[in-house]
Amino acid sequence: MAPSDQGNPQKPPLTAKSEAALQHHANMFDRWLLNAIGSRFAPAGVRFRLQNSGEAGFTGDSPLATVTIPDHSTLIRLLLDPEIEFGEAYAAGRIDVAGDLPAFIEAIFRLAAPQNFVSALRSRWLDLMHKNTLRGSRANIHRHYDLGTDFYKLWLDSQLVYTCAYFSEPSMSLEAAQVAKMDHVCRKLQLRPGETVVEAGCGWGALALHMAREYGVRVKAFNISKEQIKYARQQAKIAGLEARVEFIDDDYRNISGQYDAFVSVGMLEHVGKNNYEEFGRVIQRSLPSAGRGLLHFIGRNRPQQLNAWIRKRIFSGGYTPSLRESLEFLEPLDVSVLDVENLRMHYAWTLDHWLNRFEQSSHHVAKMLGEEFVRVWRLYLAGSLAGFRAGTMQLFQIVFAGKDCKAIPWTRDHLYSSTDKELKWFHANA
């Protein structure tokens, strides 16, 4: 007996006319969504184009950038979670940006809306997935810094310094500006021959080797990137500095002993807000009452999460603190903050150099790691450049010292004078 179709009538097939009507309404909806995006970013000179559904946004002759969105699905995902989905679509080649990419992102940063509910949920999920425990930190660092030293050699300076350079002269090369940055750090620390320094997070070892070679100190440098530690030890051997610089494959939380100076350049961003108190305790037990220290880190004007796509694709577990957040964990240490400097525009210039070098080597990067990797890193470098230009990102240097430290300068002349008269005076009288 055949089953009855009563109560379960089949829908009649769509006619060509009804299909056309549905498509028309879908296109109308897409155009409405596109206009909603375009009207928001038109003041920034940005034009949006949805294939088969027209354009919206800037209507002049020369847009800052034209963003082409291929389909309805990508458009919806962008509206639901722009913080993640723009980067994912760009990385996959589903979105094209015609124009100056850093300038486009800078314009977006200046007009961006607060994080929506979906973005906030995904951001929270990333925090849970990439906690900076002892094991988690190793995994987070491995994802970024152990990509292979040959990759970084393509676009960093000759010493592989992967932090903000210091352009004391606008015409300086990247190599010269990175040496100037290392000198800037050493002068702020008032390093003297024979002193001991501990470095938390040492990259490929350039600063530790510079401190030992140029300032006569002994350095213990901690790092949990195996690629970086391996390269740093090779460079110490080549430079004949193995007896004065020890590169230790271990977490900063395991630093022991006391030193004349504590330095951390570009590592606080990887500590995680929940670990700041512990980081402070490491500093406290590392420095005697006459010791001094320097923190160099990417920061914010106010407490705010790092971009979720950056945390997903580039810096797992990353957090860039406000100045207040960084000072709060120093307060219980009973140290005096001697100097605070913001090198934001120096980092913008550094990133401009990096991005140009990256683009020049992009075909090599593609052969090594693939086209999608190139797009991911292009967006990361361009977005970082835009962030420093727009002022959404800062670069802070904080110098602090114990209450018995005597090497406290009267002025900042020791940072900029070629004769270093004041520096020599302090060395003689400290």
Image (spheres, grey):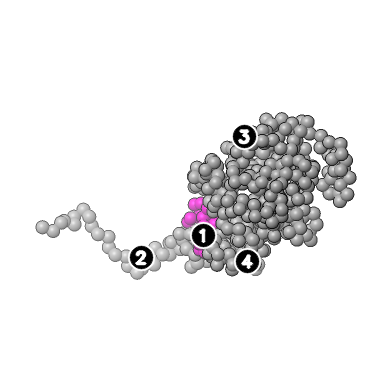
Q: Magenta segment, principal secondary structure?
A: helix
Name the N-terminal-most of marks 1 and 3: 1
Q: Nearer the viewer, residue 416 or 224?
A: 224
Name the N-terminal-most of marks 4 and 3: 3
* SS at circle 3: helix
Q: Which residues are magenta?
A: 76-96
Residue in view at x 63 percent, y 55 percent: 231
Q: Is residue 57 left or right of residue 209?
A: left
* SS at circle 4: loop
Q: Residues within 10 Å of mark 3 (few under 14, many from 20)?
A: some
Q: Nearer the viewer, mark 3 or mark 2?
A: 3
Residue 361 numbered tag = 4
> Marks 4 and 1, how far apart in space?
23 Å
Above or below 425: residue 419: below
Which residue in the structure is indicated by mark 3?
277
Q: Nearer the viewer, mark 1 or mark 3?
A: 3
Can I make out residue 420 in this image?
yes
Q: Nearer the viewer, residue 85 or 15?
A: 85
Whether residue 90 is in magenta: the answer is yes
Which residue in the structure is indicated by mark 1?
89
